[in-house]
Amino acid sequence: MTDKLHLEPDDEFPEDLSKVADKDLQVLDSQVQRQLDYEYVVEGEPNPETEFRHYDLNEEFEERDKREG
């Protein structure tokens, strides 16, 4: 896992989020969210790759919530 505060679209991203530990998934989500915020402010719109990653992370969190519930 990277120590960066945000995850740029060209940075590595896990192919299978179900194999990522909960804590690492939360860090990854924070990095993607920070990148989204940056893209909205600086570029005026998000990069499609960042949006896709954000969507994938949300789906994984929902799946984990279902398993815990």
Image: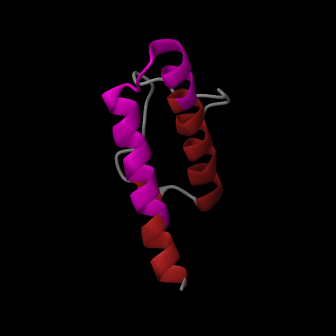
42 left or right of 44 in image:
right
Q: Where is residue 15 in the image (x, y as percent from the top left)?
A: 34, 46
Q: Report the residue at 41% width, 32% height from top.
A: 50
Q: Report the residue at 36% width, 53% height from top.
A: 16
Q: Nearer the viewer, residue 33 or 24?
A: 33
Q: Is residue 26 above or below residue 49?
A: below
Q: Determine the main secondary structure of the stretch shown in magenta.
A: helix
Q: Where is residue 20 in the image (x, y as percent from the top left)?
A: 50, 55
Q: Position of residue 42 (x, y in %)?
A: 53, 13
Q: Position of residue 21 (x, y in %)?
A: 57, 58
Q: Report the residue at 40% width, 21% height from top.
A: 10
Hey, which residue is sitting farthest top in the picture? 42
Q: Quadrant of residue 46?
A: top left
Hey, which residue is sitting farthest bottom in the picture? 69
Inspect this view and state whether residue 18 appears. Answer: no
Inspect this view and state whether residue 22 appears. Answer: yes
Q: Quadrant of residue 6?
A: top right
Per the rendered image, the range of residues in magenta is: 37-61
Does the magenta-highlighted stretch encompass residue 36? no
Quarter of the image for the N terminus: give it. Answer: top right
